[in-house]
């Protein structure tokens, strides 16, 4: 939990973020021209981005350290079309709809492993399987973004507005649509460039996502910036290995600042 029984924040870090927000409002004024929001509503691609602080020296390590989460086959993810269109799922405009955060242009390919991917979403090599996967780092859920007067202000270790469950649901829908639609599947296999392995990689990817959503069944819906991270992490660590039964995700709370 992020709050005490009387509802006040437990950590000073949230107070610091609140202080930052307050100072930004003060700097912009309280008139009609002042606007301050999180980035959970739609894409902010055109907005220029700056860091709340430029002094941090470990930014590359924070954003590019893999954790072996291996959500889905990298090639499959980068090639999938959206379920409802022929446009790729893994585009900036598409992923920003779910609250994923992109760095300033100078950080694309430096703080990210692929210029098309957002902060904390990495190309992660599995040497045992000789295959690349898409995985998450801590930064996926712990990078804040404040939009103020047309500018994106990024907070290292801040709280995200990520909508994780809608993102995974859209990924599952894209896999279902690709497997069931001959034209969509044909385009996918051609772009993937692996004619002999296309079917198997699609089926394996769908199995991974289906099983993950089953393990993390929800009894209480999450929302923008809210997730039952504890249950999900424990489910992913212990359940696939048979060490413990999965438990329903029923305690969504705000993402902690780090």
Image (cartoon, rainbow, N blue to C red):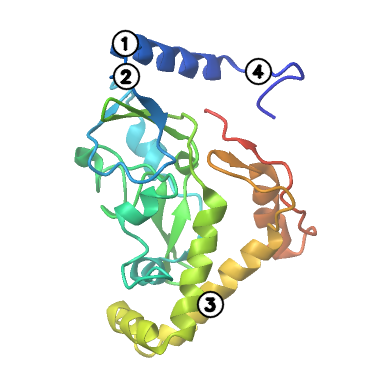
Residue mark closest to the camera, 3 vs 1: 1
Q: Could you say whether the residue bearing mark 3 is in a helix, strand or loop?
A: helix
Residue bearing mark 4 = 10
Residue bearing mark 1 = 29
220 left or right of 92 in image:
right
Residue mark closest to the camera, 4 vs 1: 1
Mark 4 and 1 residues: CB-CB less than 8 Å, in contact? no
Q: Could you say whether the residue bearing mark 2 is in a helix, strand or loop?
A: loop
Residue 225 in percent (x, y) is at 54, 38
Badge number at residue 204: 3
Q: Say whether disc 2 or disc 3 marks the residue closer to the N-terminus.
A: 2
Mark 4 and 2 residues: CB-CB less than 8 Å, in contact? no
Q: Residues within 10 Å of mark 1 (few under 14, many from 20)?
A: few
Q: Say whether disc 2 or disc 1 marks the residue closer to the N-terminus.
A: 1
Q: Which residue does the image show at 57% across and 31% down from the upper left?
A: 256
Q: Could you say whether the residue bearing mark 4 is in a helix, strand or loop?
A: loop
Q: Which residue does the image show at 41% across and 51% down from the upper left?
A: 121
Q: Could you say whether the residue bearing mark 1 is in a helix, strand or loop?
A: loop
Name which quarter of the figure residue 9 lies in. Answer: top right
Residue 114 in percent (x, y) is at 29, 54
């Amino acid at each position: 939990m992020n709050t005490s029984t009387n509802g006040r924040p437990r950590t000073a870090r949230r107070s610091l973020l609140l202080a930052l927000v307050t100072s930004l409002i003060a700097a912009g004024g309280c008139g009609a021209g002042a606007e301050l929001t999180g980035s959970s509503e739609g894409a902010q691609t055109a907005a220029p981005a700056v860091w709340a602080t430029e002094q941090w020296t470990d930014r590359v390590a924070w954003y590019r350290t893999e954790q072996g989460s291996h959500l889905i086959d990298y090639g499959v993810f980068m090639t999938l079309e959206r379920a409802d269109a022929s446009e790729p799922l893994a585009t900036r405009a598409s992923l920003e709809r779910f609250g994923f955060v992109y760095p300033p242009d100078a950080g694309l390919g430096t703080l990210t492993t692929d210029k098309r991917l957002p902060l904390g979403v990495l190309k992660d090599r599995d040497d045992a399987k000789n295959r690349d996967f898409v995985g998450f780092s801590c930064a996926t859920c712990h990078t804040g973004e404040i939009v103020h007067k047309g500018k994106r202000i990024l907070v290292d270790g801040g709280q995200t507005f990520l909508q994780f469950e809608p993102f995974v649901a859209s990924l599952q829908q894209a896999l279902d649509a690709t497997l069931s639609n001959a034209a969509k599947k044909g385009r996918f296999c051609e772009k993937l460039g692996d004619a002999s392995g296309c079917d198997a990689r699609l089926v394996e990817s769908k199995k991974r996502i289906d099983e993950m959503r089953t393990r993390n069944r929800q009894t209480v819906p999450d929302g923008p910036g809210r997730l039952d991270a504890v249950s999900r992490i424990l489910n992913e660590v212990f359940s696939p290995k048979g060490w413990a039964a999965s438990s329903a995700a029923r305690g969504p709370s705000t993402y902690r600042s780090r």
